[in-house]
Image (cartoon, grey):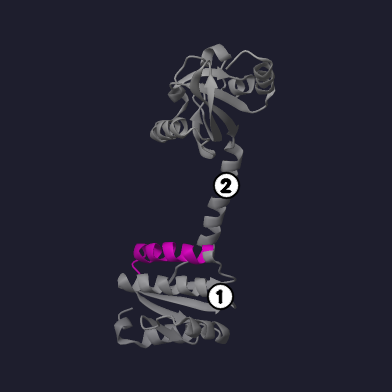
Amino acid sequence: MENSKDEKLYRHIVESSTEAIIIQQDGMFKYINPAGVDFLRAASSEEVIGKSVFDIIPEEYRELTVRHSASLLDQNKPTGIIEKQLKRFDGSLCDVETNCTPVLYEGKKAIQSVVRDITKRKETERTLEKVSKEINTLSAPVVPILEGVAVLPLVGSINSERANYILEYVPLKVQEQNVHTLISDFSGIYELDEMVIQCLFETSAVLGLLGVRSIVTGIRPQIAQSVVQLGADLSLIQIFGTLKQAVRELVLNDSFVSV
């Protein structure tokens, strides 16, 4: 960069910034502001300058970083915000979002990166994802009632997230428990939209491919109307009015005499 009033003003702004700002050139650190030194947990800027930028990039992100750097310099356009992890000088990992821009530094092409620590935000997101998964597990339990027979009691509202979880989770639990007949009881469900209905019937289709018999009970009239309007394939599903009726039929069936 030319030594000018504009450059001095720019450097003052960068030096005063509370965000980590790094300039790299040919894969080496050429500049880092005080906030960047603190962020990387380095002793000083001298500890950083001249080091390879790959010293702070975990192995799984190196190929991606090389591609982004080459594309940025070739196209001379900013990358936009990219989320990844960085490794600080003390060895700790942190989640960050970076915004990289091509610049000229000492007369040569370089990359300026603004780095924001989003570790707390990502931890919160992971915690919410874990809690959501646990809630879905509790709201879609596969409960054994006879040898090889289990009930999936569906209660409350089912949104697309919960329906997709059922599609992914239930077949796995059925296989784990050696279930050959699954009764999905809808008596606790008052409303379903078309997308959710489709997802639930896809679950029955998947179970059918696994050799699992699907029985549905407790469908309310308004839900039955929605199913008919959707044109869902009911050929793989046996339907009973109540869970009690379905269990009674299974117990009386010859195939359950040995139970």
Q: From the top left corner, tell me how far across and down residue 90 is, in percent.
A: 52, 22
Q: Image point 49% across, 75% down: which residue?
A: 197
Of pointers 2 and 1, the one earlier in the residue sequence: 2
Q: Image point 34% across, 64% down: which residue?
A: 175
**Magenta residues?**
161-179
Query: Can you say which quadrant of the picture contains the C terminus?
Result: bottom left
**Is residue 123 in the magenta section?**
no
Q: From the top left corner, tell me how far across and down residue 61 is, in percent.
A: 42, 34
- Categorize mark 1 by other alpha carbons within 10 Å: few (<14), some (14-19), many (20+): some
Residue type pointed to by label 2: Glu
Where 166 sits versus 131, above or below? below
Residue assigned mark 2: 125
- Categorize mark 2 by other alpha carbons within 10 Å: few (<14), some (14-19), many (20+): few
Query: Can residue 146 be spotted in the picture?
Result: no
Where 250 sits versus 137, above or below? below
Residue assigned mark 1: 192
Q: Is residue 131 left or right of residue 145?
A: right
Viewer-closest of 28 and 250: 28
Most prominent secondary structure in the magenta stretch? helix
Query: Can you say which quadrant of the picture contains the N terminus?
Result: top right
**Is residue 174 in the magenta section?**
yes
Tell me the SS state at disc 1. Answer: loop
Viewer-closest of 140 and 51: 51
Query: Which quadrant of the figure has residue 7?
Result: top right
Q: Is residue 43 left or right of residue 249?
A: right
Distance between mark 2 and mark 1 Cα atoms: 27 Å
Query: Can residue 183 be spotted in the picture?
Result: yes
Residue type pointed to by label 1: Leu
Tell me the SS state at disc 2. Answer: helix
